[in-house]
Amino acid sequence: MRLQNKTIIVTGANGGMGLETVKTLLQEGANIIACDINTNQLVMLENSKLTIYDGNLLDETHVQNIFSKTTEQYPKIDGLVNTAGIAQRATPIDDVSLDEWNKTMEINMTMLFLTCREAAKYMKKQQSGSIVTIASISAVRPRPGLQTYVASKGGAESFSRALAIELAENNVRVNTIHPGPCDTNMLQQFTAKEADSEVTKEEVFRKSVPLGKLLTPSDIAQSILFLLTEEASMITGAALNVDGGRGI
């Protein structure tokens, strides 16, 4: 029980990585505040230590309410895990619309800003906390046609590093995880419009991983768990590549 009675807010909690993270942290004794616009998988967990909020995390008031209600329910907020995000279908830059660019930046960056800003308010007061954000190994080693997604995930890492130095004096740690190709539904969303998603999964994504296999949501969840625990008490501003060597 490495997180016994710790309170962790998880965004994107209904997705592949998010749901596995929620399950892993619950097993380690944490109180979980799970947030997503769709919560159909979460409601099936039926755990007394799980609180679910559905709604759009781009709504500033909604984000504020989640944090406020959490502190009414529990003494403090020990962690924030940002797994929420959107993929980009592989597309040449000249075919990317402004609307597509804005949507990606809103979900992958603005949402991150809103949740981290709110977390910082509470964590600074309590002089403790850990923030973990899921970015992407593509920010380290880009793939053609994903320029908008790569920009948003590179921004997520830079934003996290800036927060890490800003909040260090308050004993708040901020770290980023760069997952490699992970076997979730989201992976198919990176496939070019005219390409076969299963062929791309095997020939492009799996073969790009030097260790020879796609990552699983559990690989990411275990890394998140580590960064939330006291075992990582001196790690901040780091970008952890959990990618099977994809970034080499």
Image (cartoon, helix red, strand yellow):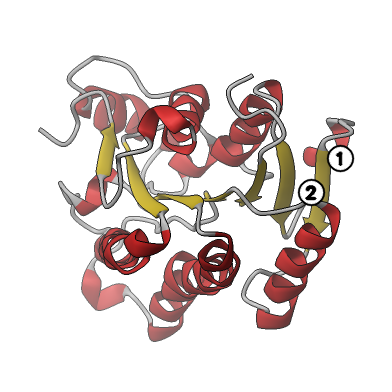
Q: How many marks?
A: 2
38 vs 47: above or below: below
Residue picked out by circle 2: 39
Mark 2–mark 1 CB contact (< 8 Å): yes
Horizontal and vertical percent position of residue 246: 19, 31
At a point 30% along the width and 62% down the height, the residue shown is 91
Residue type (three-letter) at the residue carrying disc 2: Thr
- Secondary structure beneath dot 1 equals helix
Residue picked out by circle 1: 43
Q: Residue furthest left?
A: 248
In this rendering, position of residue 74 left or right of residue 225: right
- Secondary structure beneath dot 2 equals loop
Quadrant location of the C terminus in the rendered image: top left
**Which of the two residues, 199 or 175, is positioned nearer the viewer here?**
175
**Which of the two residues, 239 or 145, is positioned nearer the viewer here?**
239
At a point 39% along the width and 49% down the height, the residue shown is 190
